[in-house]
Image (cartoon, rainbow, N blue to C red):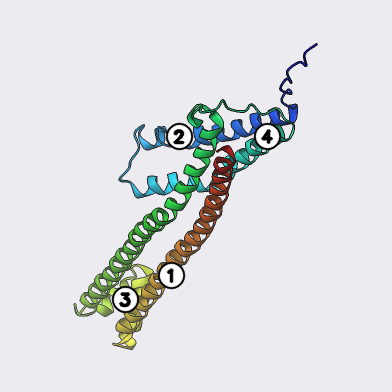
Amino acid sequence: MTASKSTKRPVPLAAQFLKLVGIILLLTFLVEWSILFITPQFNITPQFNNSQWQLTVVNQFIERGATPLIGFVFIYTGFWIQAVSGSTTQPEPGEPALKDWRFWVFVLSSLLGLLCLLGIPLYLSITGQITEQAVNQINQEAAQAEIRVEQEQQQIKQLASSGQLEQLLKSNQLPPDQQAILEQLQKDPQALDKQAGQARERIRNQQQEAVNRAQQEAFLNRLRVGLRSFLLAVGFITIGWSGLREHR
């Protein structure tokens, strides 16, 4: 009587469930991130030249990066349980690894890790452009505010030099702010210049505060996203390379 050939053990349910959940998490991430390229709010077609659209795509990739990372951990653990239980199917001698779907899982993990690394300089570049645009906008608004102060100053000076200052003050037909300024100007000829100077100083202080806030917010976002992206890259690449090394 000849000995029967040893049969491959069935795959444990734990391994099957872990791999299933991992695949679902991975597909969920890929689908949600891919939707950004066809979402209606971006006019159906991706706006590759739009800095805000680029920032949204990179942000969503990094913010949701933990989802596929957990998915790869589940898949890798499922493979490990399957190998420990002796239910792993051994490839035929000479069979190329490209035919094994496990090989592509680990390749995808490595590619996502590479994307995370590439996302760091890309994010820095995009936020730099957006911050520069925000600072330019703040400077333009401050310049326009100073122009308005200059125009109001000239208007009040024209009223004061018209020779009808007393009549204007008694008529009570001027706006309250101009009325108050003309009354001060009547007592102190330098009052208008002092108030205009204070207004300009206030505008410039507000301008500097707004610029500092924009730059500080950009720095904190860069630090947060950069660190998160780097850590995700380490996780993806570690899983991918470990799996590829064991798969050889």
What secondary structure is found at the residue carrying circle 2?
helix
* Residue type at tag 3: Leu
Query: Which residue matches tag 4?
Result: 78
How far apart, in angstroms, are the residues tagged by discs 2 and 4?
27 Å
How far apart, in angstroms, are the residues tagged by discs 1 and 2?
35 Å
Where's residue 164, x and y in %? 22, 77
Q: Nearer the viewer, mark 1 or mark 3?
A: 1
Q: Residues within 10 Å of mark 4 (few under 14, many from 20)?
A: many
Q: CB atoms at circles 4 and 1 under 8 Å apart? A: no
Q: Nearer the viewer, mark 1 or mark 2?
A: 2
Identify the residue at image location x=30%, y=87%. 190
82 with respect to 48 (left or right): right
Query: Which residue matches tag 2?
Result: 34
Identify the residue at image location x=33%, y=81%. 197
* Residue type at tag 4: Gly
Q: Which mark is residue 169?
A: 3
Q: CB atoms at circles 1 and 3 under 8 Å apart? A: no
> Is residue 43 placed above or below 218 in the rendered structure?
above
How far apart, in angstroms, are the residues tagged by discs 4 and 1?
50 Å
* Residue type at tag 1: Asn
Query: Which residue matches tag 1?
Result: 212
Q: Earlier in the sequence, mark 4 or mark 3?
A: 4
Q: Earlier in the sequence, mark 4 or mark 1?
A: 4
Identify the residue at image location x=35%, y=64%. 135
- Report the front residue among 225 and 184: 225
Q: Residues within 10 Å of mark 2 (few under 14, many from 20)?
A: few
